[in-house]
Amino acid sequence: MAVKSIFISGVGGQGTILAGKVITTALVNLGYDVKMSEVHGMAQRGGSVITQIRYGDRVYSPLIEKGRADVLLAFEKLEAARYVEYLSPEGTLIVNDLEMPPASVLVGKEEYPADIVERLKEEIRNMIVVDAVGVAKECGEIRAQNMVLVGVLARVMDWPKDAFVEVIRDVVPAKYVDVNISAFERGWDMGML
């Protein structure tokens, strides 16, 4: 199989690292060669966090060139705009309909753009906007928004659902397993273009 590329962008504290771990573990379990790269930046202070995942029969580098990602999975709207140049013209943007203003906005130096999703829709053919926070709250844990987004991604990529449920059982602390599986399954149901 040809190499596929997933670019994940988010803000520190959103669970992007756990999402990356679930995705890569499931793909390894499915028999793919998988490479992953993470950049944490100022994650502890709400800064940008990116994860690049490439998988296929044989992968030599985890790094994704601009314009080559099959999917951009953005945990926040501004992070989608910041990294959209990595998405291929045929790729899919999955974006969490969430605003987490960066420090420059919080201190009044800049304004958060009001129409990010509308502008992205003008240039992206395949786009899914997800209220992952709302769904996670309905599942009983706001922090499970990452698994909502992983569920959407898994459906878009046509990955087997059971492989991800199994990994969630293995890597998520026991008291959060059920809510995370529920969030994943809700995302899975939303992952159709």
Image: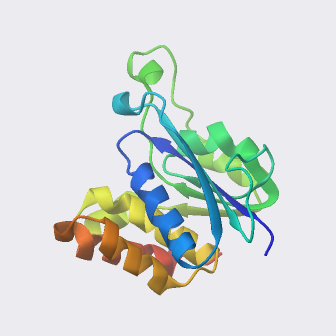
The residue at the point 37 percent across, 60 percent down is 145
- Judge from the rendering whether residue 29 lies leftward or rightward of residue 171; answer left or right: right
- Judge from the rendering whether residue 141 lies leftward or rightward of residue 120; answer left or right: left
- Judge from the rendering whether residue 165 lies leftward or rightward of residue 177; answer left or right: right
The residue at the point 60 percent across, 45 percent down is 80
Q: Position of residue 12 (x, y in %)?
A: 40, 39
Q: Residue furthest left?
A: 175
- Judge from the rendering whether residue 157 lies leftward or rightward of residue 177; answer left or right: right
Colouring method of the image: rainbow
The residue at the point 51 percent across, 24 percent down is 111
Vertical placement of residue 34 versus 119, above or below? below
Where's the C terminus, which quadrant?
Answer: bottom right
Vertical placement of residue 96 versus 43, above or below? below
Q: Position of residue 112 (x, y in %)?
A: 51, 30
Regarding residue 83, the answer to whether it shows in the image is yes
- Residue closer to the observer: 52 or 113: 52
Vertical placement of residue 127 versus 105, above or below? below
Q: Position of residue 44 (x, y in %)?
A: 35, 31
Where's the N terminus, which quadrant?
Answer: bottom right
The residue at the point 63 percent across, 37 percent down is 82
Regarding residue 185, the answer to whether it shows in the image is no
